[in-house]
Amino acid sequence: MSSLWARVLRALGASIGTLAFLLGIRRGIVIENLSRAFPDKTPRELRALALRVYRTLGATFGEVAAARSITDRELEALVTFDGFDRYTEAAQAGKGVVVAVAHFGNWELLGRACARRGVKLTAITRRLRGRWNAWLLKTRREGGMKELPDKDASRDAVALLRRGEVLAVIVDQNMRPKRGVFVDFFGTPACTSPAAAVYALRARAPLLAAFPVRQPDGTHRVQVLGPFAPAPGTSGHAAVLSLTQQLTRAVEDLVRAHPEQWLWLHRRWKTRPPARP
């Protein structure tokens, strides 16, 4: 960010992240997740990587705190896109666009940057409580992003796609068995939301993915991937499973390349497949 205040908040956030790491806040979960994904790393390497995760997450929250004062010009310089033409081509079909997103990089700035580009963006999100979350929701709305609840949103989600709008769906959170499907993530079955695939198939809308990658200079480069299509010859549940696996693989590829930029504090593999008789 160009302003001094934004740089201060980012540095402060990184320092708070370091403090959270030293205090051990969910540190065991982070290191356990990292060891599952990167079994060849030594305990010392895992601890060093975990510290980077905390510092990066802290910097992200610092940037979010400064986001409300960012001008359009500053945001345009801060967040650039690699493959935005994939979105413009997909949108021309007039069937709306489903975009899979993850807790990677600065996902909050992603929504703001899309809205500033004129994208009519609505995200399906879980209900958040508490003062911090209330502030975060207000910041999202001020940035131009709308939200739908993660329950009982099917009718509204399909309707906005049929109006030619964009639906963002988070695809990297652990789900309960009744609401998810198991796909491979770092070599382990992970219960994953099929919503992005389901809505894309139901509305016959193009399915993309967008992940903001933090750059060494503090800017963010959004990688737009897709469109994704189910494996040839598949339909119904098999098509949903195929698309969900492709999206999860895309997340994994980015996380492997930039492991410090993903939200390892989340128990991604908490839900386990049912035991076979």
Image: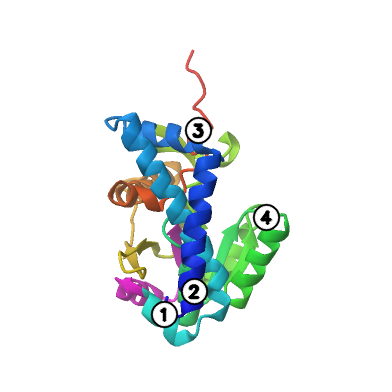
Q: From mark 3 to mark 1, how far is it between C-alphas?
A: 35 Å
Give the mark nearer the N terminus: 4 vs 2: 2
Q: Is residue 91 magenta?
A: yes
Mark 3 element type? helix
Q: Position of residue 189 (x, y in %)?
A: 41, 32
Q: Is residue 68 magenta?
A: no
Q: What amino acid is labelled 1 in the image? A: Ser
Q: What amino acid is labelled 3 in the image? A: Gly
Q: Residue at x 47, y 17 (%)?
A: 276
- What residue did someone put label 2 on? 6
Nearest the viewer among 275 and 61 is 61
Give the mark nearer the N terminus: 4 vs 3: 3
Q: Residue at x 45, y 72 (%)?
A: 7
Q: Quadrant of the N terminus?
A: bottom left
Q: What amino acid is labelled 2 in the image? A: Ala
Does 139 sit above or below residue 76? above
- What residue did someone put label 1 on? 2
Residue segment shown in magenta: 80-102
- What residue did someone put label 3 on? 28
Mark closer to the observer (4, 3) = 3
User: Which mark, by number, is residue 63?
Assistant: none
Q: Residue at x 30, y 46 (%)?
A: 256
Nearest the viewer among 17 and 77 is 17
Q: Disc 3 vs disc 1: Cβ atoms closer than 8 Å?
A: no
Q: What amino acid is labelled 4 in the image? A: Leu
Mark 4 element type? loop
